[in-house]
Amino acid sequence: MFARLFEKALTFLIDVIAFNVAFASAFWIRYGSNIFPESYNPDLEFSSYITLSIIVAAGWVLMFFFTGLYRDWYKESRLDEFFVVVRTIAIGIFFLFLITSASQLMDFARSGNLTVILTRTKLAVLFTYAACLVFFATSDRFLMHSLLSFLFTRGIGVSKVLIIGAQEQGVQLLDEIKHYPQLGYEVRGFIDDNGKFAGTQCDGLPVLGTYSDIPAIVKKERITALIFSHVSGSANEILKIVNYCGDLRLTIYMVPSLMDVISGHLKTHQIFGVPLMILLQDHMPAWEAQIKRIIDLAVSLLVLALGAPAWLAIAAIIRLTSPGRAIYNQERVGQNGKPFIMHKFRSMYQDAEKRTGPMWAKKEDPRITPVGRFLRKTRLDEIPQFINVLAGEMSLVGPRPERAFFIQQLKQEIPWYVRRIKMKPGITGWAQVKHKYDSSIEDVKQKVMYDLYYFENMSLMLDLKIMLHTILVVFTGKGAH
């Protein structure tokens, strides 16, 4: 994990340097080298453009960030990464052209003279700058990958993985991984649900246990990924493994069947020269996920800051109308099973569950105060959770976080419930705008179906739709339960 963070931090730093070197190189080529006499100007000092170079470099960092160029590219095709870099730079250069041509565009709007816009010198300078960017931005990344490959082949910073299946296919996969040490994977052993293999050796590596042993082995060996070495014909087999390790921070790969690949419903990746499918992967592209996080931060700050007088008034009313604290804190299970403390305006009487224990809210729940009933109907009881959003524990949109007490029941009764835990919980979600408050396990089962729909169709547009629907609920009360 540290190696991946170090790689990203170093890539970011080298990119910043590359962007500024590209700017300086383009400046020298066009104005200082006399390679292009028509733009040669030895009296032009680069020192006057240093601030501009830094500002433009910051813009490139944001573009690279939003297009996913700071995700894990070490196991992806270098050619694919090159094309993403070129595409990003092309889009950025187009925007630069529009920005630098703003005044000429206004002149064109007034005079109708097109020649004031498309000057050959400006286009030549931008083309030179683009060429320098492509050269330096791709060179630094190839250099980074070469450095990582060098370290990985020497066992430095590698990711530890387990192979599911101690049979012929598992041995073949192990040989492929050994053939590509530069990808940074180290196989620590095998897992096989056939008990007769436990404690034996498979191609020189130990069979560490069965499926039920996965959580303990993952923690002991610090495993980061599991790889199914065979095409499983049994959904129950996959479900069994997912249920055992769904709460762990793991990437789960599986060799897809021919029908999976042909149908196109499952995205495959070429790793070790073998097509592998990632189970329970995030369906939102990296750049959308990053924009989603920025929206989370911006909206949370605005809501908490601009509505502060109203939130203080609500807290005072809660304290005056029933004994107890205004803010109710409760441990919930977050993304990948990580617990966190969720905050809400208290809508129930103090110690409401002291006698009954954990239970779902009812339609006419006597534990809810009169003020709490209004807060729940308008969703205003959720306002303190914007603090959780700022802390990165929740998002504006996502499945509601559940308590560990209920999750243990739900994992047994609802197939693929673990998919829900893979997502960051939210203040509102598709299930909340489509269904009522949970009052029974049947309600939860229905909500899980809505949550899984959101998981499979995650996008900024769907988030926007959910947020708009939630705003209507807050102001009208319609659709809230």
Image: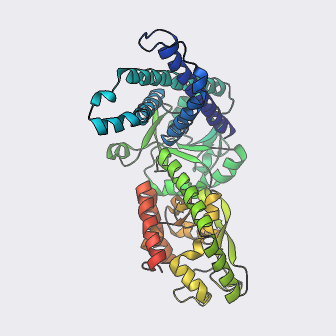
Query: Percent position (x, y) of residue 47?
Result: 61, 23
Query: Percent position (x, y) of residue 99?
Result: 43, 36
Q: Is residue 322 above or below residue 452?
A: below
Question: Splitting the image into 4 quarters, where does residue 156 fall?
Answer: top right
Total numbered circles: 0
Answer with left or right where residue 15 lies relative to residue 452: right
Answer with left or right where residue 107 lies relative to residue 133: left
Query: Percent position (x, y) of residue 435?
Result: 44, 75
Of the pair 167 and 80, the residue shown nearer to us: 80
Question: Splitting the image into 4 quarters, where does residue 312 fall?
Answer: bottom right
Residue at point 48% right, 27% down? 78
Q: Is residue 115 above or below residue 8?
A: above
Residue at point 49% right, 75% down? 474
Of the pair 29 and 410, the residue shown nearer to us: 29
Of the pair 351 and 94, the residue shown nearer to us: 94
Residue at point 59% right, 58% down? 335
Q: Is residue 300 above or below residue 191?
A: below
Question: Splitting the image into 4 quarters, where does residue 341 fall?
Answer: bottom right
Query: Percent position (x, y) of residue 304?
Result: 61, 66
**Observer able to see residue 203:** no
Of the pair 472 and 118, the residue shown nearer to us: 118
Q: Residue furthest front?
A: 111
Point out the image quarter for the N terminus.
top right
Answer with left or right where residue 380 lies relative to residue 315: left
What is the image's colouring?
rainbow
Residue at point 60% right, 56% down? 336
**Observer able to see residue 172:** yes
